[in-house]
Image (spheres, rainbow, N blue to C red):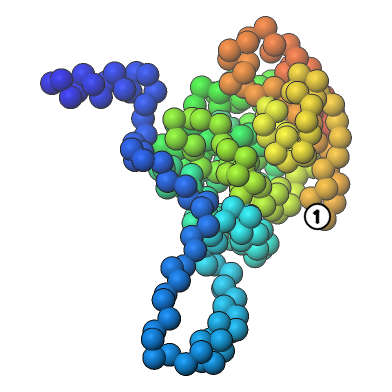
Amino acid sequence: MALRAVMSWYEAIGVDAVVLQDPIDRFAVVEPPIAPPRAAEPAREMRRRDAVPAAPAPPTTPAQSSGDEVMHARAEAARAETLEDLAGILRAFEGCPLKQTARQLVFSDGNPAGRLMLVGEAPGREEDAQGKPFVGRSGQLLDRMLAAIGLDRSTAYIANVVPWRPPGNRTPSPTETEICKPFIARQIELADPDVLVFLGGAAAKAITGTTEGILRARGKWSSYFTGKREIPCMATLHPAYLLRQPAQKRLAWRDFLSIHERLGKGGTGDG
Ligand code: URA
């Protein structure tokens, strides 16, 4: 009974992930232990063995430092020829610690053939449970914003910079974001939308490197190079922010009208 009360209390205050008591530094470089030389071993033999370079790691071997993880992520993302490949590669990828606390990969929702692609920051609790981005309260608002310009999930494609939910909905760390960036870059390249929209400052910053705050950056068109072509892109306010600051919806409305215009007057974004 007392245990149930404690669990309900935890749930009510948002504690919904169990982590270990002692923090684990998953990016620490683990040095292999140095074995003491055996007394009878000839010095020449030891030198020859020391001189042999370690065999290069095969592409799917998990790396040991965050820099290595980013390089590993780049190599893995580059292997994907299709969005299905990319989802499969991400499912097998062990280089991001967020995977260990998330329930599942949240890869995408909507129609990858749609002309509009929207990118958020990271999945929340509902998204983690359902395996789809933007299905919680902010997702419902996003659906209404899309509907206002004649779009829905059959005509737009939705993803996040980070495809695993950070525990307790915390902000993804810079290292976690760096590790996930090659995958979202490849996802954009493979989806090849005509218009790219960043939902919130974090997504805009991760993908374009902008340092401008979202209230300054929003609503301005610029260009994103996918690796194959330049596509128009814009940042707008995150629906979760709009739920907290409903008066700012008028700014988002302006942005969505501008997106609608970019897609072509009266265009539904589906071809
Ligand atoms: N916020 C995001 O940035 N992404 C989601 O999928 C849900 C909420």
Q: Position of residue 197 (x, y in %)?
A: 73, 33
The number of callouts visible is 1
Indicate the secondary structure of the residue bearing disc 1: loop
- The vertical placement of 216 against 163, above or below, is above
- Observer-nearest residue: 226 or 267? 226
Residue 258 position by quadrant: top right
Q: Residue at x 34, y 18 (%)?
A: 12
Label 1, ligand 1: CB separation under 8 Å: no
* Placement of the C terminus among the 4 image quadrants: top right
In the displayed structure, does residue 6 sit left or right of residue 65? left
Residue 268 position by quadrant: top right
| Outermost top residue | 247
Q: Position of residue 40 (x, y in %)?
A: 39, 91
Where in the image, quadrant-wise, is ligand 1 located? top right
- Observer-nearest residue: 94 or 243? 94
* Placement of the N terminus among the 4 image quadrants: top left
Residue 144 in sight here: no
Q: Amino acid at mark 1?
A: Gly
Q: Position of residue 130 (x, y in %)?
A: 44, 38
Q: Residue at x 31, y 22 (%)?
A: 10
Q: Position of residue 15 (x, y in %)?
A: 37, 26
Q: Which residue is mark 1?
A: 227
- The vertical placement of 150 against 66, above or below, is above
- Observer-nearest residue: 96 or 186? 96
Q: Residue at x 78, y 31 (%)?
A: 211
- Observer-nearest residue: 78 or 51? 51
Q: Residue at x 65, y 63 (%)?
A: 75
Residue 89 position by quadrant: bottom right
